[in-house]
Image: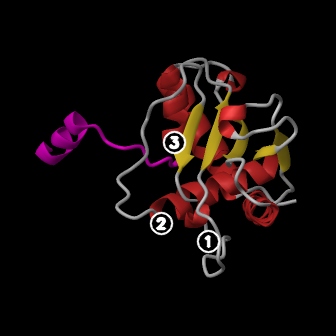
Amino acid sequence: MTVPELKKTYLNDAVPAMMKALGYSNIHQVPKVEKVVLNSSFGAELDKNSIEELRKDIASLAGQAPITVKAKVSVSNFKLRQGMPVGIKVTLRGNEMWEFLLRLIAIALPNIRDFRGVPSKLDGNGNYTLGITDHSIFPEINVERQRVNTGMDICIVTSANSDEEGVELLKLLGMPFRKHSSEAKAEQAA
């Protein structure tokens, strides 16, 4: 079994750098990526064929079959009935997680038109959620066929205790965070 490239980067570069920067004495204190959750929701008006196409797209991105999330309660204002499909999600761990993160960071995000980086706001516990408005930025998605553009959320769950640790971990893995105006000015002055 081969080790994914991004995992090698984590083990060889990120772990020693974080141990030195944050003053950890034990390798097990270093934060790691625990799982990646892909989530895509759709309205009640989407027909069964579109739902099946979205399932195939998410399965090709993740490398494993997603589960369909069904409505727990009926909401008449949204024409939603209990038991209707409202979303699709898949949880990636292990090598599949590392391979997906590499494709996201190195291929998909730079494919976004006028891309200037992703926001560096985490959830307060060291986890990062990235919203994508169109999942066709991934090369696995066939853009020629007729389909509905669907957005998705990518949740990267880490074992970091704070947002600073989480940002540092994701930066060392290559996540292209957006530079704030003060950082950009300091970089231009140097």
Q: Quadrant of the C terminus?
A: top left
- Residue 50, position as x, y percentages in the image: 74, 64
Q: Which residues are magenta?
A: 172-190
Name the kind of residue labelled 3 in the image: Leu
How far is mark 1 from mark 2, CA to CA? 9 Å
State left or right for residue 7 relative to residue 111: right
179 or 71: nearer the viewer: 71
In the image, residue 78 sits, relative to residue 20, either above or below, namely below
Q: Residues within 10 Å of mark 1 (few under 14, many from 20)?
A: few
In the image, residue 52 sits, relative to residue 121, either above or below, namely below
In the image, residue 70 sits, relative to residue 149, either above or below, namely above
Q: Residues within 10 Å of mark 2 (few under 14, many from 20)?
A: some
> According to the image, label 3 marks what residue?
172
First of labels 2, 3 by sequence position: 2
Numbered disc in front, either 3 or 1: 1
First of labels 1, 2 by sequence position: 2
> According to the image, label 2 marks what residue?
111
- Residue 174, position as x, y percentages in the image: 51, 49
